Image: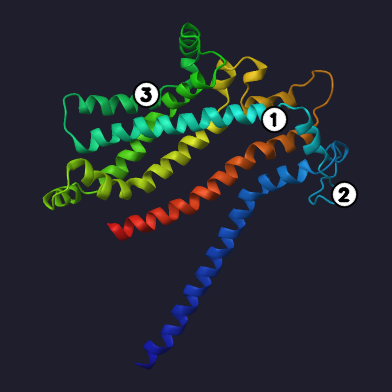
Amino acid sequence: MSTALSAAPKANRHIKVGKIIASIAAVALAIVWVFPVYWMVNSSLLPNAVLNSPTPRFLPFGGSLNNFRAVLSGGTFFPALKTSLIVTLTAVVLCLLFAFCAALAISRYKFKGRQGFVLAVLFIQMLPAEGLFIAQYKMMSSVGLLNTAIGLAGLYTAAVVPFTIWMLRGFVAGVPADLEEAAMVDGATRTGAFFRITFPLLAPGLVASGVYAFLQAWNEFTIALVIMQKESSRTLPLWLRGFVQQSNTREVDWGQVMAASSLVALPVIVFFLLVQGRLTSGLVAGAVKG
């Protein structure tokens, strides 16, 4: 009896030590992950002369907002921001609409060609994006959608939809169809049972898929480079590229590049922080309803 009692504190001590080690490792990994973001913001506050010096400065002592003022004074940031917002939000809405309908069809109904459709979605994911550039350019040119936000949003939707279907398919398959049938037994129509019972449980999956689609469309560069050739129709990634290629003769102003990068990343961070809270509350609500 005494041996068992003496062994209990030792086991608790080992558990506490393991938790401390795990916490230290998690903090170390978090620092490694956050440091590039911190370095970007820190560099955006320092003058170019300090950034080009051989001695790095890890704290923005003596820094200012001059780089941000110089970036915004050009008058090109807000048009690029408007284009990126239109393209990204349009792509997210279309992607969720098409992917949600496809995921429902795959998970809830049995129809001829169902397996072939699933394999086609998987096969499309394997195609390299670079192999489609010529076809995409000719297609957009033939319908007059080059240098337009709608045309670029359509290509983003087509690129993101396959993986989004797979994401939503897992969420839809995880909700038992018996819930809808029970509601229909109680007098609800099939449509009413779906929107009252099933749809609220799928909301977390829609939010998660929307976050994925938003990040993919917001940060995409190569398709926009091919389709959006006019300077007035540039998205933010193309706008950011202009700071590196302003001239072939002079050195890059890394202070402005870092300030522009911070401005591009800021909407993504704000959006994710807002959606993360809603995603967490949605998951909890879905668990309670289930």
Q: How is the image coloured?
A: rainbow
Comparing labels 1 and 3, the label whose residue is closer to the camera: 1
Residue at the disc numbered 3: 124
Callout 2–callout 3 Cβ contact below 8 Å = no
Q: Give the alpha-carbon distance from disc 1 to disc 3, as whole Å.
A: 34 Å
Badge 2 element: loop
Where 52 sits versus 112, above or below?
below
Mark number for residue 62? 2
Sequence order check: which comes first, mark 2 or mark 1? 2
Q: Quadrant of residue 241?
A: top right
Badge 3 amino acid = Ile
**Figure label count:** 3
Image quarter in which the C terminus is found: bottom left
Residue 237, given in percent of the width and then of the height, sits at: 63, 28
Sequence order check: which comes first, mark 2 or mark 3? 2
Q: Around disc 3, counting alpha carbons within 10 Å, would you say few (fewer than 14), some (14 to 19), or many (20 or more)? A: some
Mark number for residue 77? 1
Q: Around disc 2, counting alpha carbons within 10 Å, would you say few (fewer than 14), some (14 to 19), or many (20 or more)? A: few
Q: Give the alpha-carbon distance from disc 2 to disc 1, as whole Å.
A: 26 Å
Residue 150, given in percent of the width and then of the height, sits at: 50, 21
Mark number for residue 206? none
Badge 1 amino acid = Phe
Sequence order check: which comes first, mark 1 or mark 3? 1
Q: Quadrant of residue 118?
A: top left
Q: Give the alpha-carbon distance from disc 2 to disc 3, as whole Å.
A: 52 Å
Furthest residue toward top: 142
Residue 91, given in percent of the width and then of the height, sits at: 46, 29
